Amino acid sequence: MPKLALHFRFFQMAVIYFIIGGLLGLTFSIPQVQPFTHKSMIASGHIILVFFGWVTLTIMGAMSKMVPTMLGKDLYSQEWAEITFWLMNIGILGYAGLLILEGIAERVYHMLLPAFLANVNLVFVSFIVVGAFSFAYNFYKTAGAKTAKPLEPSIGLTLKFYRMSIAYLLVSLVIAVITILGYTENIFFGLSFASVLWVAPFTTLGWMTLTIMGAMYHLLPMFTISKIPSLKLAGFQFYALNIGIVFTGVAGLFGAKRIIFEGVEVTLLSLLQTIGVVFAGIGTFLFVYIMAWTVVTRKRKDLNVSMRFYLIALVYFTITGLFGVILKTQPGYEFSENTNIILGHGLLSVIGFASLTIMGSMYSIIPMLAVVDLHEKKKKVPEVLTEMYNEKLARLSFWLATIGVAGYIIGLVGDGYVTATLTQQGASAAVEAAVFPFTLLSILFVLILEAGVFLFALNIQKMYGWLKD
Amino acid sequence: MEHERNPKLMEKLKDVIDPEVGASVVDMGLIQSAKLDKDGNAVVEFVPSSPVCPIAFYLASEIKKKILQAEGVHKATVYCRGHAMEEAINKQVNTE
């Protein structure tokens, strides 16, 4: 069987990482497992699998095919893209694998792995970093502001988002490398490599969210046969969010995590954080408005499975945005500190928004790109794209994922709320019994979510069957 | 400006289905013009649903195939408009 095209291989690996990362995440919900995983290297390995394996590889695969199409040209170098694919995969598998191994050794067997493995770890991190830089090089050579002139203003808008999001990925990696080398203690708020990826606005908002927004600006109008209300408004949304990302990112790295509100002193950094949060909020809600307007004024009346995923993802994005603002206030921070509320907020963004959007996109992008391949090879092309997968299964995966995310997050936030309330009342001893129903809720719904992810993965695999000889 | 849409060609184009939507390119309003001269030369212009629609290549090819099946058509030329890769699409479909 001939090798699948590179973008399909990126997607295939991403889905595999999603399943492995998801299964690991599932075990984290079990109370008996938590002592082994909470704030351990195992959790860091899980983050690497989800953030780099699932989210980043999907983005890289999609960009390597879609960006040249947008510009009516070829990718600068297919070889570079191939190198990126291997560097990223070796780095992700090696780094996440070692972290998990380290975590198991430390938490389960109370032993430390040999010291030389720290250097091996660094080698795998280097693979990820070099892979990301090679991807960025290939991208900017293809779609850099000086080299690419889009025919359509809407394409220019999407490219603007992509150019910035890749810059944020590189900034995040530079910070992460400085951190892993141990130079950040004196510079930034103490962060580990994985937590830089997790908490810094450069990664979650800058790389992940900005890329998804850029993609949605061209995919959503395409799927709905519609247009965004105003390119100027979208341009303003872009700048607002970027101000938000840079301000909150810089302030956060230097330790100013809260906005000026009840009990927070006015300093340059807290001011920076406050302005950043206001602009990030404007950018977030303006995006939701633009997308909602585009859907409402659409010409295509039915909603395909991709659109359903997008709409739910936008709802979750709005909720997590509101959550984010509340958690940036001193009372919100104090209340939620060391509880699962913060985890709920983070997961709502990564699973509820990013993952559901990616799942929805794959249901349309993979068949569309497969049609291009099939047509080029003069093979049978499906009359409708839904022929390429099981539509009922797709809808079921959508509902399972949607309900799973909602129940899982409610469980986590409920757990956090009860924990915080009882702790404030000085009844810490009662916490374990009181949060038990929420723990059960989380486990039940994370299982439902995982079932949705499995069905999604099966359906995606079915699509590749069309590309076989 | 009112574009010419030859009824015979438009009828034939109803058989070209956009696989993404599952509707015909005519019903989706993608056909900008469909002309047929007395020598049997057909010229069709279409605008894909998005300037980056990856299946525009396929649609252009299908449109040409169907037009050539219409009665009295000897030669068919298809132009894709408003697509990021329209030059490549038009070159490919009209030299096939």
Image (cartoon, rainbow, N blue to C red):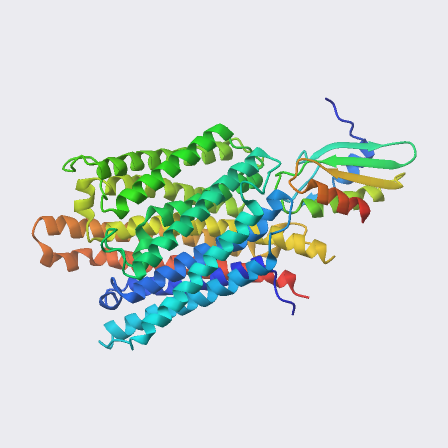
Task: Give the image location of residue A264, x and y in percent.
Answer: 16, 38
Image vertical order of residue A15 relative to residue A291, above or below = below
> Which residue is at 41% across, 47% downward?
A168
Give the farthest residue toward the top. B1
Image vertical order of residue B12 relative to residue A408, above or below = above
Q: Is residue A186 visible?
A: yes
> Which residue is at 24% across, 41% downward?
A328
Task: Give the image location of residue A311, x and y in percent.
Answer: 45, 42
Work out whether residue A275 or residue A299 is closer to the camera in this orientation and state it.
Answer: A275
| Occupied quadrant, residue A94 | bottom left
Q: Quadrant of the C terminus of chain A?
A: bottom right
Task: Give the image location of residue A281, x and y in percent.
Answer: 34, 36
Image vertical order of residue A431 relative to residue B5, above or below = below
Task: Give the image location of residue A299, x and y in percent.
Answer: 58, 33
> Which residue is at 92% across, 34% downward?
B39
Work out whether residue A33 or residue A418 is closer to the camera in this orientation and state it.
Answer: A33
